[in-house]
Structures are given as C-alpha cells and as structure tokens.
Image (cartoon, grey):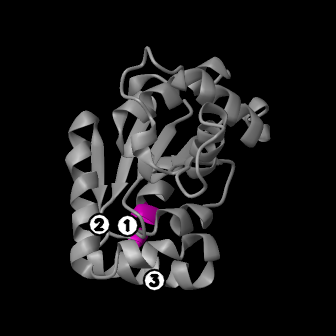
Amino acid sequence: MPKLIFVSGASGSGKTETIAAITGPVLKIEVDAIQLESARRAFPFLRSGREYDWFLWPRDPSTIDLERLLELSIAGQVRQLAEHRGDLIAEGAILVNEWFRMPFRRALARLGHSFADADVVCLFLDAPPALMLEHIHQRAARWPHRRHERAHYPDVAAVDRLRNLHLAQLATGRWELVPDPQSLSTRLDDLLA
C-alpha cells in the first residue's frame, strides 16, 4: 500500500534539503508552497511577509474551510498528483500542527489519495540547534526572501526556543523523532523500500 509520509521540523532543521535528495517514484509535496497559496486565497489583502504566519489561520474550523482551500492549492501546485499512484512525502514545518495536518490529509483524499491510518507516518526532524542556526544563516545569505530569519534567530538560544515550540506540538500525533538529516534520509529510504 502507498504511504503518506509527513516530515516536519523547525526552520533550519534540514528537512527540505534532505527531501530534495530522495529519488525514486515518490511524489514530494512542498507544504510551504501550499500554505502560501492557501493564505493568498484566504487572505487576499494580507500584508507581504505575513503569508507564512501560522497565527493567520483560525483554529475554529467553522470560520474558514481550510480543507477546501488546501484542496484547491494542492490541485493547483501539484499537477502530477492526479496521475501519481505511489508514496507521497509532504514536507513542511506547519505539519506539526494537527489543525493543519488533518485538513491537509482530507484535502488529499478529496483529490483521490486516501490513506489508512496505518499507512501514514509522521517524522519530526529534531536537529541540534547549532546545526539549525547554521542552516538558517546560510539560507538567509543565499535567499533574499529569507533574510529576516537571521534577525528572528540570531543565536542558538533563539533557535532552541523555536525548536521547543515545535516539540510541544508533537503530542497531537504519532510522531517519530529523527535526530539529524542523515538519520531522516536513512529512515525515508527504509520506508520507501
């Protein structure tokens, strides 16, 4: 049976680069792009720079149809999903939140990709804060739209606070902690074999 693999972790943990290196017939979904598209649909007058703010999203499902927004965004961003019949990897920090992950999963089902609970795996990349800080600063130097992260996370203590905020969300799912990007790569290879 195909698997749905959720990969989360705090900013700078190394999840995106690790997923990019995975080869084979797996379909990779960059959830940051889906979140951005959904935010633009839901909040058309949003100030630039707020698109990735988790606090935008109401926790009361009666106030916004997040599942429908995600369905539209996934269909628009992941064109190859309609033909794909194998494993899926959904990668993004926001997936640590059940209020986002469950509507995302239901949106995939509405698009023809349902998964039994036993076929859903949640991996959390819990990289060391010093490594995360290094990644954040490298990324800020490389990509102009990420420069603000250097100011948000100037030192290991700030990154550790971010990491702990993410870890606090893990109670809402069956998360498997993975200690570093190499271990994540190995675990994904095992799951996809």
Q: Earlier in the sequence, mark 3 or mark 1?
A: 3
- Identify the magenta region: 181-186
Residue receiving disc 3: 137
Residue receiving disc 1: 183
Q: Position of residue 10 (x, y in %)?
A: 37, 60
Task: Tell me the amino acid under the disc marked 2.
Answer: Pro
Q: Earlier in the sequence, mark 3 or mark 2?
A: 3
Write the residue at 56% across / 58% down. Answer: 49
Write the residue at 41% across / 52% down. Answer: 8
Q: Position of residue 131 (x, y in %)?
A: 35, 80
Q: Position of residue 35 (x, y in %)?
A: 57, 43
Q: Mark on residue 179?
A: 2
Q: Secondary structure at mark 2?
A: loop
**Residue 48 magenta-highlighted:** no
Give 149 or 171, whichever is nearer the viewer: 149
**Residue 184 magenta-highlighted:** yes
Viewer can see residue 78: no
Question: How far separated are the C-alphas under marks 1 and 2?
Answer: 7 Å
Above/below status of 119 relative to 60: below
